[in-house]
Amino acid sequence: MKYISFAIPSYNSEDYMSRAVESILPGGEDVEIIIVNDGSSDRTLEIAREYKKNYPGIVKVVDKENGGHGDAVNSGLASASGKYFKVVDSDDWVDPEALERIIAYLKELERDDKEIDMLVSNYVYEKVGAARKKCIHYRNVLPQDKIFSWDEIGRFRLDQYILMHSVIYRTSMLKLSQMTLPRHTFYVDNIYVYYPLPYVRKIYYLDVDFYRYFIGREDQSVNERVMISRIDQQIFVTKKMIDMYQLKDIESRKLRHYMVNYLAIMMTVSSILLIRSKKQENLEKKRELWRYLKKKDIKTYLRIRYGILGQTMNIPGRPGRRISSLAYSVARRLIGFN
């Protein structure tokens, strides 16, 4: 039995993808590694096929035309046969010892004829040049040593939201949700972690530093300069998330609160990048984005717009934009996210 299917979306990743693959291989026959070659023009496909040749019971290769990160995740999910599903970007890696503990827990679940919808673990910012590696954990917000529901969660800090790095979903639940990520679009990892949340009923938190999130390449999608150049895609993803649910219909009060705050973060990121671009046309895009939320979900709009983040991003005039930009710079240094 394959306990976890790991999808590794790979586009021109020849220089670093081996680290991702090698970090998962210690899982042996308990894992499935799906290397998705997303139309690469370098040796990515050749390297992937070499791994498949050397580890035929573990490694699969999906070779497809270029469709972007989200489309590669879609293909990985479609090919997954493991009970649970995890995305590992080709420039990131996992901790083998933490992987061993996660597999041991999933085996324990199977022996007890139990299953969960979502497993959460910690992740570490592997930021180039940083003397101290920042670890995001959930000890203060999620129960430990038990399967729990949304009604049992605590209050998340701003830097503590569940990202693609920290989540493992049950494969059949993901497929049942019919989640399809957009093609040729960056920042769809937000859709990946947000859309399935109302389908999640049973959660487990394992306090291990599992995922290693690399930050440092100049062309990386979370580089601020790159994010500003792709601001239309950030706005597109934010609008897709706004469209997904009328949040007042989410049954669990705590899940509803969590999802509202996640949307607030998305609105904040989009707004601050539009402000920092210093382009007049982007200031109009910012205003239009807030109007879009107001039209789609007035109640959520009011909660976000007049919350701390919404007020900070909408201080009028040039002095207000400077204050918003300064607040973002401070938060970026504290959190270390790019």
Image (cartoon, rainbow, N blue to C red):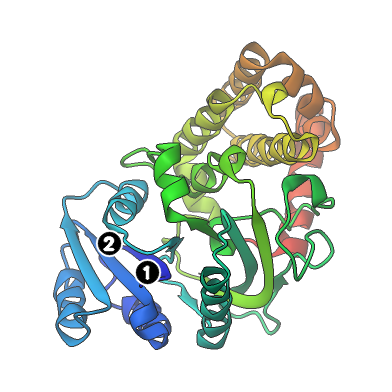
**Residue tagged by mark 1?**
90
The image position of residue 73, as x and y in percent, is 35, 53
Q: Are marks 1 and 2 in contact (CB under 8 Å)?
A: yes
Amino acid found under the numbered disc labelled 2: Tyr
Crowding at dot 1, Cα within 10 Å, few <14 / some 14-19 / many 20+, comes out as many
Residue that lies at the very extreme toward the top in this rendered image:
295
State the image quarter where residue 219 is shown.
Answer: bottom left
Toward the viewer: 261 or 336? 261
Toward the viewer: 45 or 79? 79
Q: How many marks?
A: 2
Q: Residue at x 64, y 52 (%)?
A: 202
Amino acid found under the numbered disc labelled 1: Ser
User: Considering the numbered disc 1 on the image, is that residue within a helix, a strand or a loop?
Assistant: loop
The image position of residue 193, as x and y in percent, is 55, 48
Disc on the earlier residue, 1 or 2: 2
Which disc, if any, is residue 212? none
Residue 186 shows up from this direction = no
Toward the viewer: 152 or 124? 152
The image position of residue 120, as x and y in percent, is 63, 63
Measure the alpha-carbon separation of dots 1 and 2.
8 Å
State the image quarter where residue 76 is shown.
Answer: bottom left
State the image quarter where residue 249 is shown.
Answer: top right
Q: Name the quadrant of the N terminus.
A: bottom left
**Residue tagged by mark 2?**
11
Image position of 170 (left or right of 308): left
Q: Residue at x 22, y 69 (%)?
A: 60
The image position of residue 185, as x and y in percent, is 38, 41
Q: Residue at x 14, y 82 (%)?
A: 53
Toward the viewer: 260 or 134? 260
